[in-house]
Amino acid sequence: MNRLKPRQTPKTLVENRISFAGPNAELSLYDTYLPAQHVDLAAGELLYCGMISGRKILHGRNDYHAEFFPQESFVMAPGEQIQIDFPDASLKSPTSCLTIEISQSRIDQICDQLNHRSPLQTDFDTWQYRHDNVLHSPHTQATQALLERLVANFSEDGADRDLLIDWGISELVVRMLRQQTRDFLLQTCQKKPDLNGLSAVLQHIRSHLSEPLAMENLCRIACMSRSRFFSEFKKHLGCTPAEFQHQLRMQQARERIGKGEVITRVCFDLGYRNPSHFSRRFHQFYGETPTQCQRRNQSTA
C-alpha cells in the first residue's frame, strides 16, 4: 500500500493526518514519526482501520488489548473510543495506517440489499453490523488490493472519482459484513453445533482442521445436495469449504508461530505435507513468510 500513499511534509510528528472526502465516506492517512503512548482515537461513524507499516498496540473497551500489524483490519463502531501506543515509530520508519469513515446510512442500505438478495438462514438472524462484536482480523489479498485501489481513487481527481469510490466502499462494507457474520456464525455454531446442517458442517471442519475435506461427507452432515450445499456455504461464508479450511489453518498457524512454535511442526500439525508449499501459502495470505513472522514476533516480544 505504501507505493500508492500520497506524501506531504508532516505538520505534526504524532498522527500526522491527510484526509480525502468522498460520497458517504472519508479516507484519512496517518503517519507517526515518534514513539507515543495512549493516543486517543474516537469514531463518529463506523471507522474501518487498516495498517500500512509498523506496529500499533490497541487498548479498547472490556480490557481489549491487541497488536495491530500491516495486512490487518480493525473496525470501530460509531461512538467507540480506543487508545493507541506507537512503540516502534521513528523518523526513518514511521508507523502508518489508514482509516475510512463510512456513514451508517450507507451501511444500512447495503444490509437491506443483502437481506433482500441473499438472506441468511433464519437460524442465523439477518445481515447487520453488530456493534458488540470486535472485528480485528487479517485481511485477504483481495481486501488488500481493494484498500490500495481506494487510496488511489480517493487521492485522484477524475470525472468518475465519486462513482469509483462508492463502488469500492460498497465492496469494502460487504467484505466487512461477511467477515463479521462469519465470526458470528462460528460463535453460534460452537455454542450450538446441532443448530442446523450448516452449523454442523462448520463445527466439523473446525474440529478436523488437519484432515482433507471429503465433500460427500460434508453434504451428508449438512443434509443437502452438493449444489445446494456449495450455494449455502458460499452465501453464508463468502468462500468455498476448502478456502474456509485454509483460512482457519492460516489463522491457527500464525497464532502458533507467533508463540514461538517450530514452523515445520505447525505445518504438519495443520495438515500440510510440504513445508515449502506451506510457506508459499502463508506468504500469499499474510504477505510475509512463516520465518519472517516468527522473527517479527521475537523482535517485538
Image: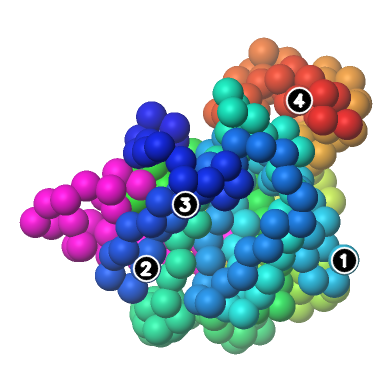
Q: Nearer the viewer, mark 3 or mark 1?
A: 3
Q: Is residue 177 magenta?
A: yes
- Which residue lies at the image location 74% right of the left edge and 18% below the top edge? 291
Residue indicated by mark 4? 296
What range of the chain is rendered magenta?
Answer: 151-180
Amino acid type of the residue that numbered disc 1 sits on in the rendered structure: Asp
State yes or no: discs 3 and 1 in contact (Cβ < 8 Å). Answer: no
Picture disc at residue 187:
none
The answer for how far apart the CA atoms under marks 3 and 1 are is 27 Å
Picture disc at residue 17:
3
Please, what is the dominant secondary structure of the magenta stretch?
A: helix
> In the rendered structure, which disc, 3 or 2, sits on the residue that comes first in sequence?
3
The answer for how far apart the CA atoms under marks 3 and 2 are is 16 Å
Mark 1: secondary structure: loop
* Image location (x, y in percent) of residue 260: 90, 26
- Which residue lies at the image location 82% right of the left edge and 75% below the top edge? 192
Amino acid type of the residue that numbered disc 2 sits on in the rendered structure: Ala
On-image quarter of the N terminus: top left
Residue indicated by mark 1? 63
